[in-house]
Amino acid sequence: MSQIIIKNVNVSNMPQAINGMRNSLENWKKSDSKVFYVVRPMHSDAYYLTLPLHEYDTSKGVVIEFTLGEKDKELALELIKTGPGHSQFMQQIFFCADITAPMTWWMDMDAFRTGTVRNFTVQMHKLVSRPLKKEDFGWDEMDDETETMRNMLLHSLNDRIKEWKEAINSHLDNPEILRMMWRCITDDIPLCYLNTATWSANYQILRDIYFSQEDHNHIEFDVFREFIETLPYSELITCS
């Protein structure tokens, strides 16, 4: 069973990226995409404005919607299929989301660190904020023997967390003992511990993940690939 949650998804800068796609030939006026603005959004006389992409200008208002034209899509797909050297615009379509997943999945995602930013929750704060529960881990369904073993581990970890918090609250002035107590907790945390991060990348990186992680042992990658297919104009990522 997959243990990945993806929320607060944001895809941005697509108008400027698609406009820049035509920079090499300077044929911006051939674009058939549209940009929708709100002009003076913080004022009572705010109004909407629709312009062709070649008139893209952020000073005109706040972009609220973008429609990719068929001609632009056709060119984009052609460039993408030619290879990354001809589709730099994909690196300028930005993606960001809050992702909760097992640490083992995050470890595999480290293969895509170039061009990404990952802002984790701080383990030191999260681990000791409350007793650990089964829901804090990406465990699959268990047989009786495995469940007993995992319950024993949880009980042991929570006892150590309680002892560590009591030592902190009593102002124990011995850093070495506190460090040893902390290591006794973290050293035995299963790698399927769920961790949340705000993760940002771009469409080219998502494309690399989509094709390189097919049939991966982590079912979370299956879910992530299915999620990628729901993004705006995901065919730019999934085309082959």
Image (tube, helix red, strand yellow):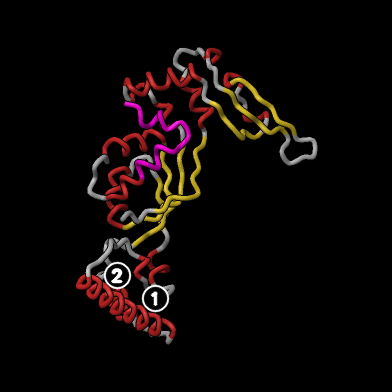
Q: Position of residue 125 (x, y in %)?
A: 42, 68
Which quadrant holds the N terminus?
A: bottom left
Q: Position of residue 201 (x, y in %)?
A: 41, 41
Q: Quadrant of residue 62?
A: top right
Q: What number is the disc on residue 186?
A: 2
Q: What element carries label 2?
A: helix
Q: Is residue 66 left or right of residue 120?
A: right
Q: Which residue is drawn at 22% across and 72% down?
A: 144
Indicate yes or no whether the magenta region holds residue 98.
no
Depicted 66 relative to depicted 218: above or below: above
User: 28 or 181: which is nearer to us?
Assistant: 28
Residue extending furthest front? 144
Above or below — where is 16 with respect to 184? Answer: above
- 24 vs 46: above or below: above
Quarter of the image that includes the C terminus: top left
Image: magenta residue range: 224-240
Number of residues whose C-alpha sits closer than 10 Å to that of mark 2, classed few (under 14), some (14–19) or many (20 or more)? some
Give x and y (percent) for residue 101.
36, 55
**Does the magenta segment cover residue 236?**
yes
Residue designated by label 1: 131
